[in-house]
Image (cartoon, helix red, strand yellow):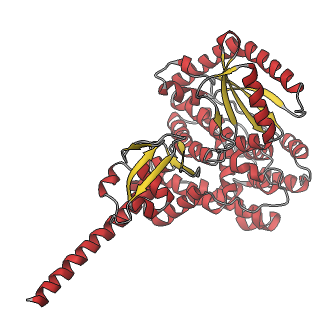
Amino acid sequence: MKMTEIVRTYDELERLVQETYSVPDVDTLRRAYDMASKAHAGEKRLTGHDFITHPLAVAYRLADMGLHMNVVVAGLLHDVVEDTEISVETVEEHFGSDIASLVESVTKLKHTIKYRGVDRYAENMRKMFLAMASDVRVVFMKFADRLHNLSTLYGMPKKKQERIARESLEIYAPIAGRLGMSEFKGELEDGSFAYLHPKEYERMKNIMDIKVREKGAYVSRIIDQIEKFLAQTNVNDFQVHGRVKRLYSLHKKLNKYQGDLSKIYDLIAIRIIVSDVEECYMALGLLHQQWRPVPGRIKDYIAQPKPNGYQSLHTTVFTENGEIVEFQIRTTEMHELAEYGVAAHWRYKEGSHKPVKNTRWMEELAQIQKELQNKKDFMEQLEIMKIDVFKDRIFVFTPQGDVIDLPEGATPIDFAYAIHSEVGNKCTAARINEVMRNLDTSLTSGDIVEILTDKNRRGPNPDWLKFVKTRHARNKIKDATRHTVKGWFSEVLKGRERAKKHH
C-alpha cells in the first residue's frame, strides 16, 4: 500500500485559502491558477492526470500549512518557468519580485541534472544547501513538490521510482528533520520506504494494523479518562488524541531492538495539548497521581529543548492491567513547532515574508558549498557530511547546562571543538556524567560533559582524526596540526641558522 495520490481542484484550493487566511488574496490566487492552467494546457503526467493537478497539489499543501500567500501562489507557478514558454520576468511583471524569486529558486533546484549515480546525488545535495542558505521557504515548496511526486511514483519506471525514493529518504527527510518538520520528515520517510523496501513496508503496516486493532479500544478508554481528569481542573482549553507510530520509524526501532516488539512502548502514544507551560506540568502531575511512571522514561524537553527546537514533556506509565502507555504533553504553539518546525514561524504571519534566520547548521552548509567548488572535493567530503549533517542528532550538556547539538556517535573531542577551537586544541581529558572517560567515547543524549584543558598544551593530537565525527572538529585539528608542524619546522631552521652563525 503506497502513498495515496489525492487529486485537488482549484475550487478546493480556494476554499481552503478562504478558511485558513484572515485576508485571503483570492484574486492573485485565481490569476496564478489561470496562468499555470493555460501554460500547462494539454500536458499530462505519467499517471495520466492533467499536469495542472501537480502544482494544485503543491499549492494546496502549502496553504494547508498556513504559509504566506506568496509561497502558495509560487507553489501554483513553480513549474511554469521550467516547463513552459513563460519567463521569470513575466512572472515578476504579473506577481511581483518576491513570488518571481521563489519560482526562480525552485526552478534552479529542479533544473534537470545531467549527472548520474553519486555525481547526481552530490549535485542534488549542493542545490538543496544553496536553496536553504538563500531562502528556506524554497525548501518548504520543494518538500511539498517532492511529497506529491512520491504519491505519484506508481506511474514511473521502477529505476526512477527507486532513485527518487532514495533521494527523498537520504536527502529530503533528514533536512526536514533538522528543520524540526516532523510531519514532513515522517511522510517523506514512509513514502520512500514503500518503494525501497516494499516487503518490509508491508510487514510494518501489518504489525501496526494488528496493534491498532488490539489496543485501539483500550487507548480510547484512557483518552476518555484523561479528558475527565482535565475537565475537573482549571484547564479549559485542551485536546487529547492518539498518535500512531510511523512505519519507517517502527522499522528503525525494531532493528535497534533486534526485532523485539515488546521493547517499543510508543506504537500508539497519547498527546495532550494545553494552553500554556504551567498546564503542561500540571497534566504531567495528574498522570503520575493516577498511574505509576516507568523509571527513566520521563523526559523534559520543555526545560531542555531538542537541538531542532522540539519541546514537549514525555512520560511512560503503567496503566491498569500492567499496560504501558506513552504520553506527550505540549502547548498548542509547541505542537505547531513539532509538526512544522521552522515553517511554523511563517504560519499566521501574513504581513511579513522576511526569511527565517538561518540556524548554525544551515550557515555551515552554505560555507561547505563555497569551499567545495568542484565535485571531486565535494565527493571526498560527502561521507563526513552525511554523518555531520544528516545523522540523528543528540544533545549534550556543559556543566553549566548549555546545550550542544552534535551528530549521533560524536565524541568529547567533537564536543570540545563545538564549544571553542581553543578548548579543543588544549583538551587533555573528559569527564562524562562526573566519570573520567576516554576521548574517543561515543556520547549519548543527555550526557553532561566537562572538558579538562592544559593551557601549555601545544595543540591537538593528529590521531584524534581517526575518531572525530564532525567536519568542524576535523578541520580545526587539521589546521592546528598544520600550524604546529610549520612552527616546529620553523624552529628547526632557526636552530640551524643559529648553529651556522656560532661556527
Q: Residue at x 78, y 61 (%)?
A: 353
Q: Taking the image as drawn, is residue 469 in sight?
A: no
Left or right: residue 111 versus residue 458 is: right
Farthest front residue? 434
Task: Please name whichever residue, 436 or 343, is drawn nearer the observer in this view of the structure.
Answer: 436
Q: Quadrant of residue 289?
A: top right
Residue drawn at point x = 89 percent, y = 25 percent? 231
Name the spot of residue 395 as percent of width and height, x first. 55, 45
- Between 416 and 116, the one lying in front of the other is 416
Residue 351 in the image: state x and y as whole percent.
85, 60
* Side (left or right) of 390 relative to 13: left
Q: Position of residue 365 (x, y in %)?
A: 53, 58
Q: Position of residue 330 (x, y in %)?
A: 75, 37
Residue at figure coordinates x 70%, y 16% from the top left: 319
Image quadrant containing the C terminus: bottom left
Based on the displayed image, in which of its 4 quarters is residue 493 positioned? bottom left
Residue at the farthest top position:
321
Number of labelled discs?
0
Q: Quadrant of the N terminus?
A: top right
- Which residue shows up at 32% across the image and 67% down it? 482
Q: Is residue 300 visible?
A: yes
Q: Is residue 486 above or below residue 478?
A: below
Does 421 sit above or below residue 206?
A: below
Q: Nearer the viewer, residue 438 or 110?
A: 438
